[in-house]
Image: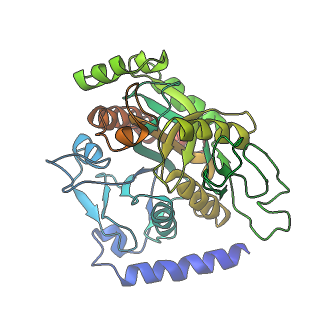
């Protein structure tokens, strides 16, 4: 099977290069792949890559003073790289399928040797107000998918807390697994991905005491909230990452996320933050690892809180969902600050990390 994967990689890579412009460096022209130490994954950018309203990518372009681009025709955005060509800075696109597709395309790109690369997701998200305040940053210990059955609550039994439940189950909060997502094996999708605990702990320990940016906007948001965690200054935490294609919101859905993450990790994690990409990224990384193209044990996911997943007192869920993200600017800055600390610790001390976290 491994030889088949390698043949597929070569064919896929040839197709990618056929659509490329002239390779951007002589090294690429020789056919020798760059030995990549780290890949930074962001999910979106707004407008230009610098000088205007920032998306997730802009803090990296400006903070790292990036200028060299590499064409990425199978992706959604040109890749940036550092002068030494040790790091790739990538925009995946938003939601599960585009993110997974971009990671798969990058993984099979013959211009890059990603076999020892660390992958750092740096993005914003919604946080549970029971865990941390807006502007905080979380390192994911688990990523949980949203594959499920759904019944509109207007047609569901009145005793149900919400309409979502496992494909293998008959009602919410019923955990039934038989080695796949259906008793007859007809559906086989991953529901939860555990990140390398040693790597996550190392990243958290390295960044937990970093000073994070605060602002009047964050202070105003803290005053609106009543939970102890939401009233604290921004901090670095560790917890569960719930990735869904739907931008859900509200008290009921937040409780669903808490229950879902707890159930699917079998009480090994708690819900911290929501997003729309990370399960796709992890599924792609799992397959790339099987193909010998990457190492899923070298993945870190850093998400910073631009908003909460439920409304403030006095708001409806709809009002809150349609509100502006009060912590977006600080979330982008704090997310970059935390993830960049880890990135440079790895890349600048490569002999220590080349063979894994010790």
Q: Nearer the viewer, residue 357 or 170?
A: 170
- The quarter in which the C terminus is drawn is top right
State left or right for residue 170 relative to residue 305. right
- The quarter in which the N terminus is drawn is bottom right
Q: Nearer the viewer, residue 26 or 155?
A: 155
At horizontal 59% and vertical 29% (from top left) the residue drawn is 201
Q: Nearer the viewer, residue 4 or 242?
A: 242
Residue 349 place in picture, x, y as percent: 45, 36
Outermost residue on the left side: it is: 51
Residue 62 place in picture, x, y as percent: 22, 44
Residue 307 place in picture, x, y as percent: 38, 35
At horizontal 31% and vertical 64% (from top left) the residue drawn is 77
Q: Is residue 280 above or below residue 242?
A: below
Residue 236 place in picture, x, y as percent: 46, 25
At horizontal 50% and vertical 42% (from top left) the residue drawn is 274
Q: Is residue 354 above or below residue 187?
A: above
Q: Quadrant of residue 292?
A: bottom right
Q: Quadrant of residue 151?
A: bottom right
The way the protein has been coloured in the rendering is rainbow
């Amino acid at each position: 099977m491994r030889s088949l994967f390698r043949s597929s990689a070569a064919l896929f890579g040839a197709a990618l290069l056929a659509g490329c412009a002239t390779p951007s460096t002589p090294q690429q022209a020789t056919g020798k792949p760059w030995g990549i130490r780290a890949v930074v994954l962001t999910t979106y950018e707004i407008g230009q890559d610098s000088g205007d309203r920032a998306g997730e990518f802009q803090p990296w372009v400006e903070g790292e003073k990036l200028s060299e681009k590499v064409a990425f025709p199978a992706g959604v955005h040109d890749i940036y790289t550092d002068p030494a060509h040790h790091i790739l800075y990538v925009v995946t696109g938003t939601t599960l399928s585009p993110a997974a597709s971009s990671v798969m395309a990058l993984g099979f790109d013959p211009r890059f040797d990603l076999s020892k690369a660390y992958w750092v997701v740096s993005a914003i998200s919604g946080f549970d107000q029971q865990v941390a305040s807006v502007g905080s940053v979380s390192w994911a210990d688990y990523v949980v998918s949203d594959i499920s059955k759904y019944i509109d609550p207007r047609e569901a039994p009145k005793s149900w807390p919400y309409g979502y439940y496992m494909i293998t189950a008959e009602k919410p909060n019923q955990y039934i697994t038989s080695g796949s997502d259906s008793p007859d094996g007809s559906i086989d999708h991953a529901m939860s991905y555990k990140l390398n605990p040693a790597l996550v702990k190392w990243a958290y320990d390295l960044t937990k005491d970093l000073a994070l940016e605060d602002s009047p906007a964050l202070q105003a948001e803290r005053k609106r909230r009543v939970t102890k965690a939401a009233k604290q200054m921004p901090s670095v935490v560790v917890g569960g990452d719930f990735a869904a294609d739907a931008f859900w919101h509200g008290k009921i859905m937040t409780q669903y996320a808490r229950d879902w993450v707890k159930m699917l990790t079998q009480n090994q994690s708690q819900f911290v933050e929501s997003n729309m990409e990370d399960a796709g990224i992890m599924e792609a990384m799992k397959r790339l690892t099987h193909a010998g193209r990457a190492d899923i044990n070298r993945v870190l996911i850093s998400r910073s809180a631009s908003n909460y997943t439920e409304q403030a007192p006095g708001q409806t869920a709809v009002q809150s969902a349609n509100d502006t993200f009060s912590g977006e600017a600080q979330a982008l800055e704090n997310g970059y600050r935390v993830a960049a600390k880890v990135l440079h610790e790895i890349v600048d001390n490569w002999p220590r990390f080349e063979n894994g976290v010790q």
